[in-house]
Image (spheres, rainbow, N blue to C red):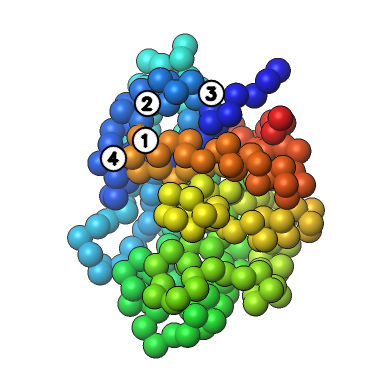
């Protein structure tokens, strides 16, 4: 079977996310128009998101679930829809997250770090008074803490998210500068049976690389990592499947023969070519 490109998007958002205005049905229609095979919704659930802005990321779980079930049925002949979530981890909320997500059967869970020490790097305050090295190291330390203490996820999202919003001239997270902690994170993820994602939003944001960057993806493979999903992190329909052709090439160049999709929290491996 030849796998069509651009067709298995495992990270995208709908108006159930506080930062997205497009309905689930709008996203689905776009995906069908472009022959997507699978679309997995991963709306935000960032419990105790800092009150820096008017945005909230408290997901309305019953509405999210009911709308998903309705549309899954409605479009079942055209596309396979999967029920996922992107949870924002912070050490003091593990139990709340576990309680909340245990009430639903998800196909797929992305764990992400959007908030570090009570601050979302998106708003800039996080970087104040920190050198690039301090900002990035602290961010990575919190990811390491999360993977050491939280287990109910499938892949860790956009591991170098921190590079998006800092004011540093060269924002890239160079693997060699943080190799010890990046290795510790990747090894823990692999040893505990989890994975990472290749998030193509970096290509949209002009980094010309995915999140995490190619050196980190390569290192993950070298360490034995096999589970890797591909996601656009779309908040607009036209971003669905963005740069997936490039993503397949990157995975292939990093030594992967397969990429991963999830159903009922179980990984399935599909050949890249
Ligand atoms: Zn995210
Ligand atoms: Zn996202």
Q: Which dot marks residue 30?
A: 2
Q: Residue drawn at (31%, 69%), measured in percent from left and top? A: 123
The mark that comes first in sequence, 4 or 2, is 4
| Contact? badges 1 and 2 (CB < 8 Å) | yes
- C-alpha separation, residue under disc 4 versus residue under disc 2: 15 Å
Q: Locate residue 173: give its quadrant.
A: bottom right
- C-alpha separation, residue under disc 1 versus residue under disc 2: 8 Å
Q: Which dot marks residue 52?
A: none
Q: Is mark 1 within 8 Å of ligand 2?
A: no
| Contact? badges 3 and 2 (CB < 8 Å) | no
In the rendered image, which residue does mark 3 sit on?
37
- Badge 2 marks a residue whose secondary structure is helix
In this image, 20 relative to 222: left or right? left
Which of discs 4 and 2 lies nearer the camera? The answer is: 2
**Quick one: 140 or 49, which is closer to the camera?**
140
In the rendered image, which residue does mark 1 sit on?
238
- C-alpha separation, residue under disc 3 versus residue under disc 2: 12 Å
- C-alpha separation, residue under disc 4 versus residue under disc 1: 15 Å
Numbered disc total? 4
Q: Which dot marks residue 15?
A: 4
The mark that comes first in sequence, 1 or 3, is 3
In this image, 255 relative to 151: left or right? right
């Amino acid at each position: 079977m030849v796998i069509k490109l651009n067709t298995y998007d495992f990270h995208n958002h709908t108006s159930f996310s506080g930062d997205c205005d497009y309905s689930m049905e709008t996203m689905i229609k776009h995906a069908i128009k472009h022959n997507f095979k699978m679309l997995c919704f991963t709306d935000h659930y960032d419990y105790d998101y800092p009150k820096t802005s008017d945005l909230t990321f408290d997901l309305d779980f019953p509405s999210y679930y009911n709308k998903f079930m309705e549309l899954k049925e409605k479009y079942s002949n055209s596309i396979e829809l999967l029920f996922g979530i992107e949870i924002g981890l912070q050490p003091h909320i593990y139990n709340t997250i576990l309680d909340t997500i245990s009430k639903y059967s998800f196909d797929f869970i992305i764990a992400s770090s959007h908030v570090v020490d009570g601050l979302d790097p998106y708003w800039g305050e996080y970087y104040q008074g920190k050198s690039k090295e301090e900002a990035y190291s602290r961010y990575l330390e919190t990811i390491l803490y999360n993977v050491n203490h939280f287990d109910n996820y499938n892949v860790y999202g956009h591991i170098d998210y921190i590079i998006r919003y800092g004011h540093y001239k060269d924002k890239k997270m160079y693997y060699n500068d943080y190799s010890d902690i990046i290795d510790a994170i990747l090894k823990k993820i692999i040893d505990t049976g989890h994975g990472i994602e290749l998030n193509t939003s970096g290509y949209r944001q002009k980094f010309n690389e995915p999140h995490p960057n190619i050196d980190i993806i390569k290192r993950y493979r070298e360490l034995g990592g096999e589970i890797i999903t591909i996601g656009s992190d779309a908040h607009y329909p036209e971003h669905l499947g963005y740069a997936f052709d490039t993503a397949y090439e990157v995975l292939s160049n990093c030594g992967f023969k397969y990429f991963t999709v999830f159903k009922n929290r179980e990984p399935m491996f599909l050949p890249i070519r």
